[in-house]
Amino acid sequence: MSVIVRFLSFLLSFRYKLQVKGLDLLDKDAAHLILPSHVALVDPILLYGVLRTKVSLHPVATRKFYDTRLLKPLFKLLGTIPVEDFEKDQGGTEDAEKLMKTLKEHLQQGENVLLYPQGGLARQGYQSIIGKKSAFYACQVIPKDTKILAVSFRGLRGSRSSMAWNGKSPSLFRFFIRGIFFCLINLFVLLPKREVKIEITDVSKELRQAEQSGLDIFNIALEKIYNAKGEETISYISSRWAHNTVAHHFPPSKIEGALDTLRKKVDYSQMKYPKDVFQYIIQRIAEIKPDYSKAICLDTNLILDLYFDSLDMAELKSSVAAHFPQASNPPLLDLKAVGDVVLMAMGKSPYVEELKPCDWKYPENPQFVYPDLRKRLTKQDTILTMMKKNFRQDEHLSYCYDQLFGVQSRHDFMIKAYLIADILKKFP
């Protein structure tokens, strides 16, 4: 593993000139919860290369990257902890609880965990952790002797692997392919360098105190640590030494998911809606956010006013969809205000979520997958044992499809069946 890390760090050194401050805070005899800012797709690789020289790490990564065919073997070698992509309306409370349990186990064993509080990439020149819960929950469950370190990045805003390049989520694969290409045509050593500053600070005392005051205060404290030097400007660095490739490249007029796009300016004053629909939604919001004391109206913003994170929004959406049979199915990110949820409940949402692709995997040899059952039956067999036998034969075959996750394999289905069985066993 160390050989792979050194090789990646060696390649990236042709493009990035790193200035690291606070590396001495890492203690080989202590467990660390490391909370970095997230500006570009490349910053986890840069940070891992720096920290790995001092301590071993277990990074947390979303399934979007963890399950990538080319990257999965590498992630497994790194000891990566996979987590569902909550922003994409995947996973639920059980997945979050499982993540916290895993983090706690690693830290209790004296190991180190790399967790990104913001989750996704920064949309603006500062870190925004509104409503995010992962770092808050982690600080609640970790052992008391765990050191909490914050890591701030400066210099990556404007990189091709940042949202500031063209306002959209960058592709890690394309970024690396382009990087290798420009390394070659610049003969490696002539590739213009981007200066990146990495600052590590011990925030154990500040965050443990803030955690006692609740989620919102905790996130504000963490944002102040990351944004202490103010908003970072966009800097575009040429990809060729002999020709300025970014001379006519300008900042995007709009960045997906930026805070200014979350404030949806819609006039709900003329909207007619059943009172029972609105009351139900208010009731569900109160259950999700019991400490919120202000009056809620149709204009109330779920993220900026109520501090909802993607898990909260998924819970609200799921509840409304289950309660109102005529409900629409808008994408989670299009539910910006309470009025959007009311429209969803009424079946009048202007947005419709596209169905997941149905990439069904058929068996190459049906006779192998569906053999003559009479040859396999025993007197002890039941329907359940036969089902288990069949499912073990080729667990990656497609078995069912649902609107939330798309195609599910036999393995996926059985995992969920066992999970639900454990929940049902708790009831008399």
Image: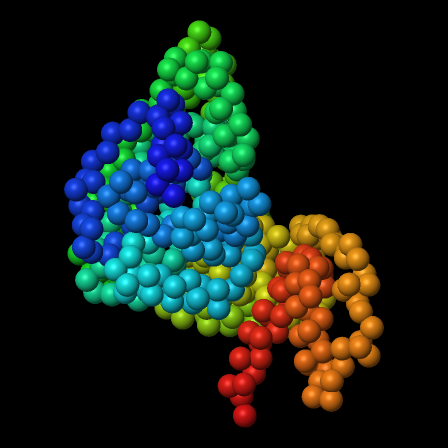
Q: At 46% across and 8% down in the image, what residue appears?
A: 243
Which of 377/92 is in front? Answer: 377
Colouring chosen for the image of the structure: rainbow
Q: Choose between 419 and 368: the one closer to the eye.
A: 368
Residue at the front extreme of this rendering: 375
Looking at the image, which residue is at 20% across and 47% down? 26
Q: Nearer the viewer, residue 379 or 210?
A: 379
Question: Would residue 278 be visible to someone looking at this image?
Answer: no
What residue occupies the far bottom of the structure in this picture? Answer: 428
**Residue occupying image coordinates x 39% and y 64%:** 102
On the rendered structure, is 39 left or right of 175? Answer: left
Q: Give the quadrant of the C terminus.
A: bottom right
- Residue 347 position, x and y percent, is 70, 61
Where is the N terminus found, in terms of image quarters? top left
| Residue 99 spot, x, y in % from top left | 42, 62
Tally the numbered discs.
Answer: 0
Residue 63 lies, in percent from the top left, at 52, 52
> Left of 161 or right of it: where is 232?
left
Given residues 228 and 406, the one toward you in this image is 406
Residue 408, quarter of picture: bottom right
